[in-house]
Amino acid sequence: MIAEGVSVNVTLLFSLDRYREVMEAYISGLEQRDGDLSNVSSVASFFISRVDSEADKRLDAINSADATALKGKIAVANAQVAYEAFLETFSGPRWDALAARGARPQRPLWASTSTKNPDYPDTLYVDQLIGPNTVNTIPEKTLDDFDDHGTVNRTVDADLAGAHAVLAKFAELGISLADVTRQLEDEGVASFSKSFDDLLETLEEKAKTLK
């Protein structure tokens, strides 16, 4: 679709591997398109809070001090490492050639950024993911909270070494982040598919009443 000039929101992203595939698809699509590329845009919607919700369950099951210390940290670290991949992908000769034709980077969009756990700061997933070329779909309450007491700093890549360290400790506990993100992707796709099917059913019923 990118090659045809259609702007796309690629959603339900949880894993770095899937995100890399999405960025590659975007760049490949641009490379297949002739002429000016400035009228094509895209975002990659990377889901945040759901990662902590599932990761925290697995950390609770371990029930150790090391596991507890990681609660509420996996989602942000995962997103920050994804942003690092974004910076790497949209730089260098391959990207520069497309940018010279007007191409715009596919921006990471942070989705699901309200905190689900009341023990966590209410602006956690906003404060820690601020940076250039990012989008954050902030729920209204979270936006109000951030306006009241949020912190405006470039944070998304301020401590990438720390983000990698958090994910390494998570793996050392024997928890597979790949399993976490795969489960979330499967659940998300199933939920979105059901919503779409429900919408079609509603439209069909409505159409019958108009005949």
Image: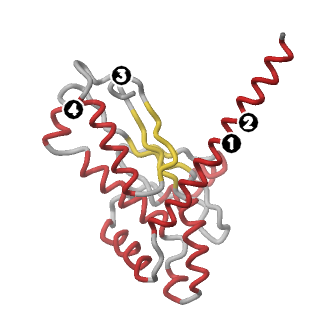
Mark in front: 4 vs 1: 1
Whether residue 28 is situated above or below residue 168 in the rendered picture: above
Q: Earlier in the sequence, mark 2 or mark 4?
A: 4
Q: Secondary structure at mark 2?
A: helix
Residue 96 lies left or right of residue 50; in this view the side is left
At label 1, which amino acid type do we have? Lys
Query: Which residue carries the number 1 mark?
Result: 194
Q: Earlier along the polypeptide chain: callout 3 or callout 4?
A: 3
Q: Are marks 1 and 2 in contact (CB under 8 Å)?
A: yes
User: Gap between marks 3 and 1, in whole Å?
Assistant: 28 Å
Residue type (three-letter) at the residue carrying disc 2: Asp
**Among numbered discs 3 and 1, the one appearing first in the sequence:** 3
Q: Give the distance between the C-alpha atoms of the residues marked 3 and 4, in whole angstroms.
A: 18 Å
User: Could you say which disc has been placed on residue 21 in the image?
Assistant: none
Disc 1 to disc 2, C-alpha distance: 6 Å
The answer to whether residue 79 is above or below residue 140 is below
Q: Nearer the viewer, residue 132 or 43?
A: 43
Quarter containing the C terminus? top right
Q: Is residue 106 left or right of residue 203?
A: left
Secondary-structure class at tag 3? loop
- Residue 86's x, y, as percent? 31, 50
- Residue ID for mark 3: 4
- Amino acid type shown at disc 3: Glu
Query: Closer to the camera: disc 2 or disc 4?
Result: 2
Q: How far across and down, in percent of the image, does residue 45 sit? A: 47, 45
- Residue appearing at x 27%, y 35% in the figure: 28
The answer to whether residue 96 is left or right of residue 23 is: left
Q: Nearer the viewer, residue 31 or 40?
A: 31
Label 2 and label 4: CA atoms lie apart by 41 Å
Mark 4 lies on residue? 99
Report the residue marked by disc 2: 198
Discs 3, 1 touching: Cβ within 8 Å: no
